[in-house]
Amino acid sequence: MDETDLAGARDGFRAGAAGVAIGTGIALAAWALSALIGDGAFPGYLLGPLLMPASSFVAPLWRERRGHRRPATLVALALCLPVMVAALAVGDLLAEDPDHGPTGWSGVLYLVMLLLSTTVFGALAGPPGAEPGRSWLRFTGRGRRYHLAVYGSLAAAFALALGLAAAAG
């Protein structure tokens, strides 16, 4: 990774961390309110709004880093799938509560995936102000080794998650 990739990863992590902090604050406040007023269970309807604050912090990163944002977005979103498979394999993190709603672990998993995705997006999206890429899969101006490393890492994450699922199941 060169310096611009590391700076991008830091920018992506900061954007994701700000969104995760606000989402966590919303979740904890609603959970506390549920404990005071209701039954104390995690309010499952919060899973969507947990992710909404992050979009306000990721949007400037999206606008600044035009260089490789399409393949970077594809890789960042595809990385969520092996994380979900691994979470399902590890245990009942995504199990439903008795009322058939999501548990608090689902919210934590979504926030972790958001942080991971924004960090990967920031690292792969290229420097600010770069010319937009022309392909959904190719990082324009990058060599074959870079593509092999990015897509090979994604394939390894899929294989590791499926291996974990097979071993746990």
Image (cartoon, rainbow, N blue to C red):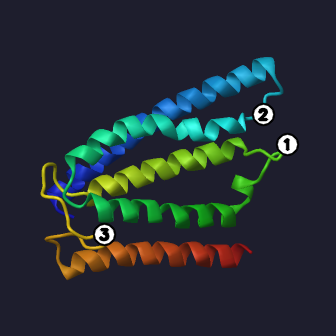
Residue 14 to residue 6: above or below: above
Using residue 78 as the reference point, say whether residue 33 is left or right of it.
right
Instruction: Point out the image quarter for the N terminus.
Output: bottom left
Residue drawn 46% across the image and 34% down it: 53
Image quadrant in which you'd find residue 40:
top right
Q: Would residue 14 be seen by someone viewing this image from the given angle?
A: no
| Residue 99 - label | 1
Residue 147 to residue 33: above or below: below
Q: Earlier in the sequence, mark 3 or mark 1?
A: 1
Residue drawn 55% across the image and 62% down it: 83
Q: Earlier in the sequence, mark 3 or mark 2?
A: 2
On the image, numbered disc 3 is attached to which residue? 136
Front residue of 117/92: it is 117
Secondary-structure class at tag 2: loop
Residue 23 picture location, percent across and down? 52, 34
Marks 2,1: beta carbons within 8 A: yes
Q: Mark 2: few, some, or many residues within 10 Å (few <14, many ≥20)?
A: some
C-alpha distance separating marks 3 and 1 = 41 Å
The residue under label 3 is which amino acid type? Trp
Residue 38 to residue 161: above or below: above
On the image, numbered disc 2 is attached to which residue? 41
Image quadrant in which you'd find residue 92:
bottom right
Q: Mark 1: few, some, or many residues within 10 Å (few <14, many ≥20)?
A: few
Residue 141 picture location, percent across and down? 13, 71
Residue drawn 50% across the image and 60% down it: 80
